[in-house]
Amino acid sequence: MRDGYLDTVDYGFRETATNTWKLRLRYKATLGGQLTDGRPGSLPRAAELAGYGFHSYLTYSTAYGALTAAERVAVKEDLPIKRTAGHAPTALSGTTTTGNGYARNGAGVCRDVYLAH
């Protein structure tokens, strides 16, 4: 978020064979006046996650795409976690709940929660 190169990061549980989310928490970094200090919210209690593997997926912003190849490498090397390339899991049939954001000192994250049916 610091330089505006990251867009979203998803954490959750997916069906590995089909690469589909069962439960996904999506975070998007935000700046500006729409933010209020608050609690991030809770997780759905109805999610049955036995047998699903934990997964995360990171997307980059258009500002990142405008960097040179060497600059993109430098951004990735500066991340605290080394990520591997992959395909984004799909969210085929489920419910997304938005509005779970939180902030401090003018910067924060918005969060939505996806739960497959």
Image (cartoon, rainbow, N blue to C red):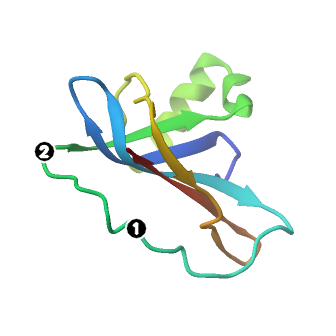
Callout 1: SS: loop
Q: Position of residue 17 (x, y in %)?
A: 21, 24
Quadrant of residue 65 within the rendered picture: top right
In front: 89, or 80? 89
Q: Where 47 falls versus 3 (above or below)?
A: below
Q: Quadrant of the C terminus?
A: top left
- Whether residue 82 is visible, yes or no, is no
In front: 22, or 30? 22
Q: Which residue is mark 2?
A: 51
Q: Which residue is mark 1?
A: 43
In the image, taking residue 28 as reference, residue 107 lies left or right, namely: right
Residue type at the position of mark 2? Gly
In front: 22, or 2? 22
- Whether residue 62 is visible, yes or no, is yes
Quadrant of residue 31 within the rendered picture: bottom right
Q: How many marks?
A: 2
Residue at coordinates 63% horizontally, 67% vertically from top-left? 101
Residue at coordinates 38% horizontally, 23% vertically from top-left? 85
Tell me which label, 1 or 2, sits earlier in the chain.
1
Q: Which mark is residue 34?
A: none
Callout 2: SS: loop
Q: Where 34 falls versus 60 (above or below)?
A: below
Q: Position of residue 60 (x, y in %)?
A: 60, 34
The single residue placed furthest to the top in the displayed view is 69
Q: Position of residue 52 (x, y in %)?
A: 19, 43
Q: Position of residue 29 (x, y in %)?
A: 65, 55
How packed is label 1: few (under 14 Cα within 10 Å), some, or many (20 or more)? Answer: few
The single residue placed furthest to the right in the displayed view is 33
Residue type at the position of mark 1? Leu
In the image, taking residue 56 as reference, residue 105 lies left or right, namely: right
In the image, taking residue 34 as reference, residue 97 lies left or right, namely: left
Q: CA distance from mark 1 to mark 2?
A: 18 Å
